[in-house]
Amino acid sequence: MIFDGRIIAGITVFVAVAKTGSYAKAGEQLGLSRSGIGKAIGRLEDRTGMRLFDRNSRAIKLTDQGRTFLD
C-alpha cells in the first residue's frame, strides 16, 4: 500500500468513534458534525480497503477488521 497521509487524519476520527461508540459523541470531542464523522470514516474505509464498522440506524459496532485496526 502506498502511504497516504490523509489516513492519519482518519485514524483520529476512527479512534474517537471506536472509543465512544457514537458518531455524535466523537463529533463533540473532535468539533465535527455527525455527517463529517461519517464521511471521514467512509474515506478511511475506502483508503484502507477495510470495513471498520457495522452500522445500522440504532448502533455502531467494530468489525473484526476494525478491532484489529484499533489494536
Image (spheres, rainbow, N blue to C red):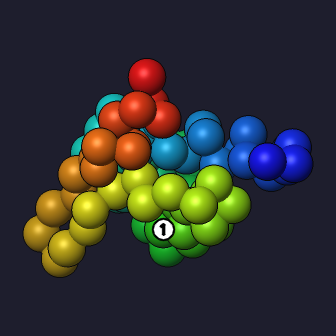
Residue 14 or 1: which is nearer the viewer? 1
Q: Position of residue 23 (x, y in %)?
A: 37, 57
* Foreground residue among 66 and 26: 66
The number of numbered discs placed on residues in the rendered structure image is 1
Vertical comparison of 22 with 39: above or below: above
Q: Name the residue located 61 percent from the left edge and 40 percent from the top edge.
A: 11
Depth check: give the residue in front, 70 or 35.
70
Q: Residue furthest front?
A: 1
- Rendered position, 40 above or below 63: below
Q: Secondary structure at mark 1?
A: helix
Residue sitting at x 40%, y 32%? 68
> Residue 65's x, y, as percent?
39, 45
Task: Name the side, left or right, on which 12 lies relative to 47.
Answer: left
Q: Residues within 10 Å of mark 1 (few under 14, many from 20)?
A: some
Across and down, in percent, residue 50 comes to 50, 57
Q: Residue at x 73, y 39 (%)?
A: 8
> Which of the image's four quarters has the C terminus?
top left
Q: From this viewpoint, is residue 12 visible? A: yes
Check disc 1 and report the residue beneath it.
38
- The x and y percentages for residue 16 are 45, 38
Residue 24 drawn above or below residue 5: below
Q: Disc 1 marks which amino acid? A: Gly
Name the outermost residue toward the top: 71
At a point 17% along the width and 77% down the height, the residue shown is 57
70 over 39 or under it: above or below:
above
26 left or right, relative to 64: right
Q: Is residue 36 visible?
A: no
